[in-house]
Amino acid sequence: MEAQHRRRPPLTALACAVIAASMATVEPRQCAAQVIEFESGGLKYLTQTKGGVTVMFAYLPVQVREFAVIQVAISNGSTQTWNFRPEDFLFQRSDGAAIQATPARKVVEGFIERGNRGDVIKLVTAYESGLYGMSKHQSTNGYEQRRQAALAEVNSTRLKAAAAASAIVLVPVKLRPGESTDGAVFYPNSGRPLGPGHMSVRAGPSVFEFETTALVPPPRSEDFR
C-alpha cells in the first residue's frame, strides 16, 4: 500500500485513446455516447463519456459480507462543477430486480462496527490491484489521497485498517472542471456477485447506461461437471 506510483494522464485521455483506436470512423459528437470495453490491471472495464463527464467501472472479484463491490472512476472534463455520489448508481439484474448502491456513510459505519481484518485485507488487495494497474488513470481526489489523509490521523493498527478500508469507499464529492475521483461502490446483494444486468448512473448532466454482460467471465469447464 505504500508503493510509489508514477504520475498518470487524466482519465479522459484513456477514454479518448480507446475510442480513437476502436472507432476511428465515428464522428466526434457521436463518439462521446458510445460504451467502450477494455481491460486494465486484470479487470474488465466499461466506460462512457457524455457532456464532458467520463464514467468507468469494473466488477471487483471480491464480496464483502452482504455486498458485491464495483470499482468506479469519474473524470469531469466539462466546463462546470458537478456533484457525484454512490446512490446515483443503480443496478438492474437480469431478473428485473433493481439494487441501489448503499450510501457511503452506511458502508463506512458497517466497517467500523463489524469489519474484521479479513474483510479489510480482501477488499484493499482487490481494489489496489485494479487501481494501480490502471497506468493511465490519475485521480485528483480519489482513494490514494483519502488513504494518506486517513492514515496520517490515526495511530492504532486496528483503526489504521478501518481507515484504509473506509478510504476505498466512493464518497459524495464535488468535482470541478479537470478533476477526477475513484472509489468502491457497494451493492447489498446477499454476498453474491452482481452478474449480468443493466447499470444506470446519473452523473453530472447525463444518465449513463451500461449492459454488464461483458464484465461477467464465461463459465469454467469445471462448472459443468
Image: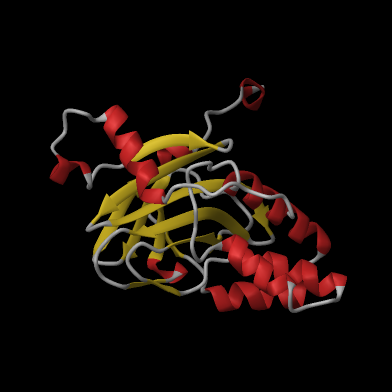
Q: Measuring 52% from the left and 66% from the top, which residue is drawn there?
A: 170
Q: Nearer the viewer, residue 136 or 189?
A: 136
Q: Position of residue 142 (x, y in %)?
A: 53, 63
Q: Measuring 27% from the left and 33% from the top, which residue is drawn there?
A: 20
Q: Nearer the viewer, residue 207 or 193?
A: 207
In the image, residue 105 sits, relative to residue 124, either above or below, namely: below
Q: Is residue 99 left or right of residue 151?
A: left
Q: Position of residue 141 (x, y in %)?
A: 50, 66
In the image, residue 33 sits, relative to residue 79, either above or below, namely: above
In the image, residue 110 sits, relative to residue 15, either above or below, namely: below
Looking at the image, which residue sits at the far front? 7
Dividing the picture into quadrants, the one containing residue 190 is bottom right
Q: Position of residue 200 (x, y in %)?
A: 34, 57
Q: Measuring 71% from the left and 66% from the top, which residue is drawn there?
A: 164
Q: Is residue 51 left or right of residue 173?
A: left
Q: Position of residue 111 (x, y in %)?
A: 71, 71
Q: What is the basis of the colouring in this image?
A: secondary structure
Quadrant of image for the C terminus: top right
Q: Is residue 115 visible?
A: no
Quadrant of image for the N terminus: bottom right
Task: Report how many numbered discs are placed on residues in the image.
Answer: 0
Dividing the picture into quadrants, the one containing residue 80 is bottom left
Q: Nearer the viewer, residue 53 or 223?
A: 53
Dividing the picture into quadrants, the one containing residue 46 is top left
In the image, residue 78 sits, relative to residue 82, either above or below, namely: above
Q: Measuring 35% from the left and 60% from the top, which residue is drawn there?
A: 201
Q: Is residue 19 visible?
A: yes
